[in-house]
Amino acid sequence: MNIKTRKNYDIQTIIMSVLTLLTIVSSIAMGLLLYTRYEKAMKQAEIEAADTLITSTVYSVEHYLLNMRQISNTISYNVIQEQDVSSREFNQELSLFYEMNKDKLQSIALYDNNGKLIAAEPVTSQKENVDVLTQNWFTSATEEIENMHFSTPHIQNLFRDDASRYHWVVSLSRSVDIIDGGTPRNGVLLIDMKYSGILDMLEKINRDNNGQYYYLCDSDGHIIYHPHTVEINRGTFIENNEEVASYEDGIYEDRINGENRKLIISTISYTGWKIVGVIPIDAKNETLIRFRYYIITIVIILIMMILFVNKIVSKKISSPILKLDDSVKAYEAGEKPSIYIGGSSEIRHLGRSVQKSYEQIEALMKEIVEQQNERRKSELDALQSQINPHFLYNTLESITWMIEGHRNEDAVFMISELAKLFRISLSKGKTIISIEDELQHCRSYMNIQKHRYKERFAIEYDIDSEILTYCTVKLILQPILENAIYYGVGDMDEDEDARIIVSGVIEDKDIYISVEDNGLGMREEDVKNILVDNQKVPKHGSGVGLINVHTRIQLMFGEEYGLLVESEADVGTKVTVHLPAVPYNKENCEELEKSKIWKG
Amino acid sequence: MKKNKLTFLIAEILLAAIAIFFASRIFFSEKPQKRVAVIIDNSGDEKWNAFVNGLKQAADTYNIHLIICNTDEIENGTEEKNLINEQLDNDIDAFIIQAAPGYDVHQMLTELADQKPVILVANDALTENIVENIHAASTLTKVMPDNYKMGYELGEEILKDNGASLNGKTLGIVGGLLETDCTMKRQQGLKDALADSGCVISWEINAGYDNNVMDILKWKAEVDYLAVLDNEALVQLCEREQSIANNDTLVYGIGTSIKSVYYLDEGRMECLVMADAYGMGYDSVDEIAKVLKGSVYKPDDHVIDTVVLRKEDIFTEETQKFLYTYE
């Protein structure tokens, strides 16, 4: 058999547990929602900021390159086409342009289509064995004469440097028409822009960027600037620049080395160069990490506060219930506390109902006890009343015989004793009488019986006078004497010295009154069953009378009192009445009359 | 009821402790940067450009605060020790050091390595233990090129230009600072490469902080080949090429600066062997960062790549990528 054991939690614990669970779940859910929303907003803001930055950088780079193109156009249209390249004015104007823009320009050079240097600014010697015909800027310019061509950054390999250094440049080359000594021909104008100009612009936007970075590549995906150029060249950093070069402007997502990234692409006009902003999606920047700590702190404080409120609320709700429960438990434990009535209207109503119920239960209990007492009294009265008719019939018949035999004196004596007997029997309806009256009743009865049995047996009284003033249930000796006569000495002959001894003593606050005869006695088995109120057990003679007496004494004084029967066949029988020593006075009588069991 | 109150109180105290912990993280979440001191001779010299670029890039990647000590010549262990002590007073977490010349440096750096992580770059601390004609490597962690190999490669390049035979040819060797591991190993590598070539080593000199190589060269016998194993000496030599009496001498050098490349381009030397200085800088910080991150990490030696440059290689895409590290 499965027995489910269920732990007993009080209502406050249950309310507190449920509220705590709800608080924690809702607070964490709220924190997560807030954090997720903020993270998304931050990412969006990052993308927007990056987009704005790229737009601004595109503008700067476009402006820078436009400036270069304007220089190229001006030199081409206003200097080269206007002046003979062999003239002094041409060199002066070229020099002037260089001086005006030397912060941005590394050099300006004009080559003829055979790769021969015509003019250069600043004026410096060209390296030996330099073959410009194989250099990309030259071939691009001669192959597509209608366009200007921007190269990727490279070390300038044309002129000597007094400081023995190399210069990183971006070459802008174009085909130009020149007049050399009056002869028109084609040439290539090369403007080498300082790479540092572009580097500065892009390095500026790559500072303090929380994992995001920006790079610049040409339309074929060749890197022009990248904050990790060296790592890319060394193969320790991977960039998908070649793929990105084919993308239109916009925002894309890609994944490199297991990292998800947002790419913001914007194209620089004319050159087709692209600025690419890379924002790692998964990377948590410092602000976001701090916000996470902030949210956790807020959620914990919120939980603490709500728990505190929960505690108060649960106490407020449960306290009246617990008090009511405590008072009911105390009531159940036998105390008589007043039932708690307090708290909300429902609890108060419950308290009142419980109190009313208990009051009703008490009233009913009292009623039941009273009814039981009445019933017991009725039973007692019924038992008492069993004696009278039987005896009265026999006595009256004896008196009748006496009168018919003209034994008037005897009849008078009998009637007189019978009157005493009935006086005591009636006792004004009382159940409790003094032992003295009971003994008087006993004597009257025995006087009547002796007349009836013509003095065939003797009766002796050995009564301690001290017991006379104590209480007894009335008419308890008469049935015993009746038994002693009918089943003891009544059938004995005169010469057998039949005798009944009535004795009474007081011992240890108990009174013992015994009726002893030297009659026929009883078997041991009969003695055992004589006081058992069982219809199936055969009684010796009028055992019913003894049972009545025994029951009446116990009903009045308790189970520890009653009759004790001792008997031996052909020796005699002794029946002892055991009573508490209750002084015969008004109070005790009234109390016993109420049929309360005597409690000493 | 008392148990409930106690549980509630403990829960509130625990939550308060957690809240305080996270609140403190809001204000003090930034981890203090680890401070790494870099001690190299003539730290402002352009020969360190690529190395410093590598250092800075790695420091940025690993969030390390680099302190590149402003130094001139570091002539011996005592000077280096003074610099180290200054930095120890400056709450430095680790050191990247070029070992100074001298035999006493190894002991001093070994003692330092017991206190703070130390990575040696460019030059190993000289030990007195010699195995097969070369000084045994120190027990310290090293991120540097194989100097013996660089000298050997230079010798092979000389041989390559002469059909593997240098019979009757003379060679002068200009080494770096005396009593430095790198100089000794480069010299030994060069000699081993030319051992069976028939080449006669006419003389050997060493560059020093106090002597001018050109002044010494004036007094040396003419040679067919000059092997310069030190960047400063190489640059000095190339700068004053016109003053060398014998212009027929072919120069082969080991260099670490963009100037040495320029002089190769100018045709003032035949061949240049260079180390990947950027890689040396990057890897040294990378290794230090790993050491500082976990106390159980045992740092490893890194052997830095070397490249052999000829004039015709300078403007190839590969070489330009390499030279970009000096930018």
Image (tube, coloured by chain):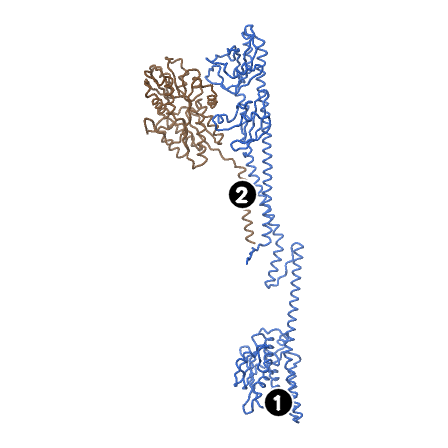
Chain colours: A blue, B brown
Amino acid carrying mark 2 in the image = Ile
**Quadrant location, the C terminus of chain A:** bottom right
Residue A204 at x, y percent in the picture: 54, 25
Q: CA distance from mark 2 to mark 1?
A: 108 Å
In this view, the residue farthest toward the bottom is A406
In the rendered structure, the answer to whether residue B315 lies left or right of residue B1 reads: left
Whether label 2 touches label 1, CB < 8 Å: no
| Mark 1, other Cα within 10 Å: few <14 / some 14–19 / many ≥20 | some
Regarding residue A471, the answer to whether it shows in the image is: no
Looking at the picture, does residue A114 appear above or below residue A347? above
Please name the residue shown 48% across and 33% down the image.
B33
Query: Which residue bears the numbered disc 2?
Result: B18
- Camera-side residue: A171 or B241? A171
Amino acid carrying mark 1 in the image = Arg
Image quadrant where residue B199 sits: top left
Looking at the picture, does residue A586 appear above or below residue A49? below
> Number of labelled discs?
2
Residue A246 at x, y percent in the picture: 57, 25
Element marked by disc 1:
helix
Image quadrant where residue A522 sits: bottom right
Q: Which mark is residue B210?
A: none
Chain for numbered disc 2: B
In the rendered structure, the answer to whether residue A403 lies left or right of residue A461 reads: right
**Quadrant location, the N terminus of chain A:** bottom right
Chain for numbered disc 1: A
Query: Which residue bears the numbered disc 1?
Result: A452
